[in-house]
Amino acid sequence: MKTILLKFSGPLQSWGTTSHFETRQTDRYPSKSAVIGMIAASLGYRREETQNIQKLNDLNFGVRIDQTGVSIQDYQIAKKYKKNGELERTYVTNRYYLEDAVFVVAVGHKNHQFMNMIEEGLKRPYFQQFLGRRSAPLAADFFLGSTKTDIEESLKKIDWQAANWYQRSNSSTLTAYVDSDLLTEGATRTRHDRVKSFSQRNREFGYRGERRIEISVNTNNETSLDNVEEHNAFDSIGG
Protein backbone atom coordinates (compact mmCIF):
# COMPACT_ATOMS: atom_id res chain seq x y z
CA MET A 1 0.00 0.00 0.00
CA LYS A 2 1.16 3.50 -0.82
CA THR A 3 -0.73 6.60 0.28
CA ILE A 4 -0.07 10.17 -0.87
CA LEU A 5 -0.99 13.01 1.49
CA LEU A 6 -1.91 16.45 0.16
CA LYS A 7 -2.67 19.70 1.96
CA PHE A 8 -5.46 21.82 0.53
CA SER A 9 -5.18 25.33 1.94
CA GLY A 10 -5.42 28.88 0.68
CA PRO A 11 -7.57 31.99 0.90
CA LEU A 12 -10.37 30.37 -1.16
CA GLN A 13 -11.50 26.88 -2.19
CA SER A 14 -14.70 25.56 -3.77
CA TRP A 15 -15.89 21.95 -4.01
CA GLY A 16 -19.33 21.63 -5.58
CA THR A 17 -20.98 18.28 -6.39
CA THR A 18 -24.60 19.32 -6.88
CA SER A 19 -24.43 22.76 -8.50
CA HIS A 20 -26.19 23.64 -11.72
CA PHE A 21 -26.68 26.66 -13.94
CA GLU A 22 -26.09 30.09 -12.36
CA THR A 23 -25.77 29.09 -8.69
CA ARG A 24 -22.55 27.21 -7.87
CA GLN A 25 -22.48 25.94 -4.30
CA THR A 26 -19.51 24.51 -2.41
CA ASP A 27 -19.52 21.43 -0.19
CA ARG A 28 -17.86 21.64 3.24
CA TYR A 29 -14.90 19.51 2.12
CA PRO A 30 -13.29 18.35 -1.15
CA SER A 31 -14.99 15.66 -3.21
CA LYS A 32 -13.22 12.57 -4.56
CA SER A 33 -14.29 13.49 -8.10
CA ALA A 34 -12.60 16.89 -7.77
CA VAL A 35 -9.38 15.27 -6.59
CA ILE A 36 -9.58 12.78 -9.48
CA GLY A 37 -9.94 15.76 -11.80
CA MET A 38 -6.84 17.33 -10.28
CA ILE A 39 -4.86 14.10 -10.69
CA ALA A 40 -6.09 13.61 -14.26
CA ALA A 41 -5.00 17.17 -15.13
CA SER A 42 -1.63 16.56 -13.49
CA LEU A 43 -1.12 13.47 -15.66
CA GLY A 44 -2.08 15.37 -18.80
CA TYR A 45 -5.33 13.49 -19.46
CA ARG A 46 -7.82 15.26 -21.74
CA ARG A 47 -11.50 15.43 -20.77
CA GLU A 48 -12.39 12.88 -23.44
CA GLU A 49 -9.95 10.25 -22.11
CA THR A 50 -12.79 8.65 -20.18
CA GLN A 51 -11.22 5.22 -19.75
CA ASN A 52 -8.05 6.60 -18.14
CA ILE A 53 -10.05 8.95 -15.93
CA GLN A 54 -12.48 6.26 -14.77
CA LYS A 55 -9.53 4.11 -13.65
CA LEU A 56 -8.73 6.79 -11.06
CA ASN A 57 -12.00 5.87 -9.29
CA ASP A 58 -10.10 2.78 -8.07
CA LEU A 59 -7.96 4.98 -5.81
CA ASN A 60 -8.71 4.75 -2.12
CA PHE A 61 -9.74 8.16 -0.82
CA GLY A 62 -10.11 10.04 2.44
CA VAL A 63 -10.21 13.68 3.51
CA ARG A 64 -9.68 15.17 6.99
CA ILE A 65 -11.10 18.56 7.93
CA ASP A 66 -8.26 20.33 9.75
CA GLN A 67 -9.73 23.84 9.63
CA THR A 68 -13.38 24.29 8.76
CA GLY A 69 -13.25 27.68 7.03
CA VAL A 70 -16.12 30.06 6.41
CA SER A 71 -18.64 29.94 3.56
CA ILE A 72 -18.73 33.14 1.52
CA GLN A 73 -20.64 34.28 -1.57
CA ASP A 74 -18.95 36.02 -4.47
CA TYR A 75 -20.89 38.57 -6.48
CA GLN A 76 -20.36 38.12 -10.22
CA ILE A 77 -22.15 39.26 -13.33
CA ALA A 78 -22.16 37.61 -16.76
CA LYS A 79 -23.34 38.64 -20.20
CA LYS A 80 -25.16 36.59 -22.81
CA TYR A 81 -24.92 37.50 -26.49
CA LYS A 82 -27.13 36.68 -29.42
CA LYS A 83 -25.76 34.80 -32.43
CA ASN A 84 -25.43 38.11 -34.31
CA GLY A 85 -23.17 39.49 -31.57
CA GLU A 86 -25.71 41.80 -29.92
CA LEU A 87 -26.02 41.78 -26.13
CA GLU A 88 -29.06 39.75 -25.06
CA ARG A 89 -28.93 40.27 -21.29
CA THR A 90 -26.73 40.80 -18.25
CA TYR A 91 -27.38 38.65 -15.21
CA VAL A 92 -26.01 37.83 -11.73
CA THR A 93 -24.36 34.49 -10.98
CA ASN A 94 -23.93 33.17 -7.46
CA ARG A 95 -20.57 31.54 -6.64
CA TYR A 96 -19.82 30.15 -3.18
CA TYR A 97 -16.38 29.54 -1.67
CA LEU A 98 -14.76 28.30 1.53
CA GLU A 99 -12.50 30.94 3.06
CA ASP A 100 -9.42 29.97 5.14
CA ALA A 101 -10.20 26.23 5.13
CA VAL A 102 -7.51 23.55 5.48
CA PHE A 103 -7.88 19.88 4.51
CA VAL A 104 -5.61 16.84 4.41
CA VAL A 105 -6.46 14.65 1.42
CA ALA A 106 -5.22 11.04 1.22
CA VAL A 107 -5.21 8.93 -1.95
CA GLY A 108 -3.79 5.42 -2.04
CA HIS A 109 -3.53 2.13 -3.90
CA LYS A 110 -1.75 -1.18 -3.48
CA ASN A 111 -0.09 -0.79 -6.90
CA HIS A 112 3.09 1.20 -6.15
CA GLN A 113 3.88 1.76 -9.83
CA PHE A 114 0.45 3.35 -10.31
CA MET A 115 0.97 5.55 -7.24
CA ASN A 116 4.49 6.53 -8.30
CA MET A 117 3.08 7.77 -11.61
CA ILE A 118 0.47 9.84 -9.75
CA GLU A 119 3.06 11.24 -7.35
CA GLU A 120 5.27 12.31 -10.24
CA GLY A 121 2.30 13.95 -11.94
CA LEU A 122 1.27 15.85 -8.80
CA LYS A 123 4.81 17.15 -8.32
CA ARG A 124 5.29 18.07 -11.99
CA PRO A 125 1.76 18.64 -13.37
CA TYR A 126 1.02 18.80 -17.09
CA PHE A 127 -1.98 21.11 -16.65
CA GLN A 128 -2.41 23.72 -13.92
CA GLN A 129 -3.80 22.51 -10.59
CA PHE A 130 -6.27 24.55 -8.52
CA LEU A 131 -8.55 24.18 -5.51
CA GLY A 132 -11.89 23.67 -7.20
CA ARG A 133 -11.82 26.80 -9.37
CA ARG A 134 -9.10 28.37 -11.48
CA SER A 135 -9.09 31.47 -9.26
CA ALA A 136 -8.00 29.36 -6.22
CA PRO A 137 -4.33 28.34 -6.60
CA LEU A 138 -2.45 25.79 -4.49
CA ALA A 139 -0.21 26.74 -1.57
CA ALA A 140 3.52 25.99 -1.55
CA ASP A 141 3.14 23.15 1.00
CA PHE A 142 0.57 21.28 -1.13
CA PHE A 143 2.49 17.97 -1.24
CA LEU A 144 2.90 16.63 2.32
CA GLY A 145 4.52 13.30 1.47
CA SER A 146 3.70 9.61 1.11
CA THR A 147 3.34 6.67 3.49
CA LYS A 148 3.19 2.87 3.33
CA THR A 149 0.07 2.72 5.51
CA ASP A 150 -3.59 2.74 4.49
CA ILE A 151 -5.84 5.79 4.24
CA GLU A 152 -7.26 5.69 7.77
CA GLU A 153 -3.90 5.14 9.45
CA SER A 154 -2.24 7.84 7.36
CA LEU A 155 -4.90 10.38 8.31
CA LYS A 156 -4.48 9.47 11.98
CA LYS A 157 -0.71 9.95 11.98
CA ILE A 158 -0.31 13.18 10.04
CA ASP A 159 0.08 16.31 12.20
CA TRP A 160 -2.73 18.82 12.55
CA GLN A 161 -2.31 21.29 9.65
CA ALA A 162 -4.53 24.09 10.95
CA ALA A 163 -3.12 27.56 11.63
CA ASN A 164 -1.88 28.19 15.17
CA TRP A 165 -4.67 30.70 15.89
CA TYR A 166 -7.22 28.03 14.95
CA GLN A 167 -5.59 25.30 17.06
CA ARG A 168 -5.63 27.56 20.13
CA SER A 169 -9.43 27.84 20.13
CA ASN A 170 -10.70 24.57 18.61
CA SER A 171 -10.92 20.91 19.57
CA SER A 172 -8.12 18.56 18.49
CA THR A 173 -10.68 15.89 17.52
CA LEU A 174 -11.07 16.19 13.76
CA THR A 175 -13.66 14.80 11.36
CA ALA A 176 -12.65 12.75 8.33
CA TYR A 177 -14.62 11.13 5.50
CA VAL A 178 -13.31 7.91 3.95
CA ASP A 179 -14.49 5.58 1.15
CA SER A 180 -17.14 3.39 2.78
CA ASP A 181 -15.54 0.11 1.62
CA LEU A 182 -12.37 0.94 3.59
CA LEU A 183 -14.14 0.85 6.97
CA THR A 184 -16.15 -1.86 8.70
CA GLU A 185 -18.22 0.34 11.04
CA GLY A 186 -20.36 3.42 10.76
CA ALA A 187 -23.24 4.61 8.63
CA THR A 188 -22.67 5.04 4.92
CA ARG A 189 -23.54 8.36 3.29
CA THR A 190 -24.09 8.38 -0.47
CA ARG A 191 -22.57 11.21 -2.46
CA HIS A 192 -22.95 12.10 -6.15
CA ASP A 193 -19.22 11.78 -6.59
CA ARG A 194 -18.11 8.87 -8.82
CA VAL A 195 -16.65 10.04 -12.12
CA LYS A 196 -18.18 8.60 -15.28
CA SER A 197 -17.14 11.31 -17.71
CA PHE A 198 -15.54 14.79 -17.66
CA SER A 199 -16.37 15.39 -21.31
CA GLN A 200 -17.82 18.84 -21.95
CA ARG A 201 -20.51 17.19 -24.08
CA ASN A 202 -21.56 14.72 -21.42
CA ARG A 203 -20.33 15.39 -17.89
CA GLU A 204 -21.66 12.50 -15.84
CA PHE A 205 -21.29 11.27 -12.27
CA GLY A 206 -22.49 8.23 -10.36
CA TYR A 207 -22.72 7.65 -6.63
CA ARG A 208 -20.10 6.54 -4.10
CA GLY A 209 -20.38 5.77 -0.42
CA GLU A 210 -18.35 7.37 2.35
CA ARG A 211 -18.18 7.02 6.11
CA ARG A 212 -17.38 9.55 8.80
CA ILE A 213 -14.74 8.96 11.47
CA GLU A 214 -13.37 11.09 14.30
CA ILE A 215 -9.59 11.43 14.65
CA SER A 216 -7.72 12.79 17.66
CA VAL A 217 -4.55 14.59 16.69
CA ASN A 218 -1.65 15.79 18.80
CA THR A 219 -1.86 19.41 19.87
CA ASN A 220 1.19 21.62 20.10
CA ASN A 221 1.50 22.93 23.67
CA GLU A 222 0.35 26.47 24.41
CA THR A 223 3.88 27.77 24.90
CA SER A 224 5.15 26.63 21.52
CA LEU A 225 2.02 27.97 19.79
CA ASP A 226 2.37 31.35 21.45
CA ASN A 227 6.00 31.61 20.35
CA VAL A 228 5.24 31.01 16.68
CA GLU A 229 4.44 34.12 14.67
CA GLU A 230 1.66 33.89 12.11
CA HIS A 231 2.48 34.88 8.56
CA ASN A 232 1.34 38.43 7.86
CA ALA A 233 1.82 39.57 4.28
CA PHE A 234 1.05 43.20 5.22
CA ASP A 235 4.09 43.32 7.52
CA SER A 236 6.31 42.62 4.51
CA ILE A 237 5.02 45.67 2.64
CA GLY A 238 4.84 47.96 5.66
CA GLY A 239 1.06 47.87 5.94
Image: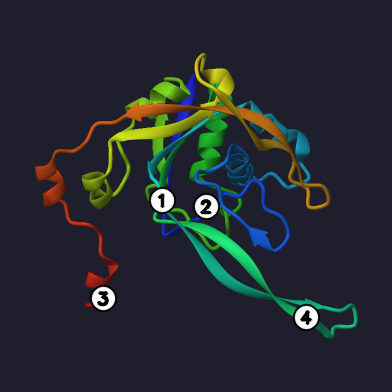
Residue 107 visible: no
**Mark 1 crowdedness (10 Å alpha carbons): few <14, some 14-19, many ≥20:** many
Instruction: From the image, tell me which residue sits under label 4.
Output: 89
Q: Residue 3 location, x and y as percent?
A: 47, 27
Residue 237, numbered circle: 3
Disc 2 target residue: 131
> Which is nearer the N-term, disc 2 or disc 4?
4
The kind of residue on which mark 2 rests is Leu
Q: How is the image coloured?
A: rainbow
| CA distance separating discs 3 and 4 | 42 Å
Q: Secondary structure at mark 4?
A: strand
**Extreme residue toward the top, this view:** 184
Badge 2 crowding class, 10 Å Cα cut-off, few under 14, some 14 to 19, many 20 or more, is: many
Residue 115: x %, y % from top left: 54, 28
Q: Name the mark nearer the viewer: 2 or 3.
A: 2
Residue lying at the far left of the rendered structure: 223
- Which disc is residue 50 wearing? none
Q: Nearer the viewer, mark 2 or mark 4?
A: 4
Q: Closer to the N terminus: mark 3 or mark 4?
A: 4
- How crowded pointer 3 is (Cα within 10 Å; few <14, some 14-19, many 20+) is rated as few
Q: How far apart are the two marked residues, 2 and 3, measured between alpha carbons?
A: 27 Å
The residues bearing labels 1 and 2 have C-alpha atoms spaced at a distance of 11 Å
Q: Which residue is mark 1?
A: 101
**Comparing marks 1 and 2, which lies closer to the viewer?**
1
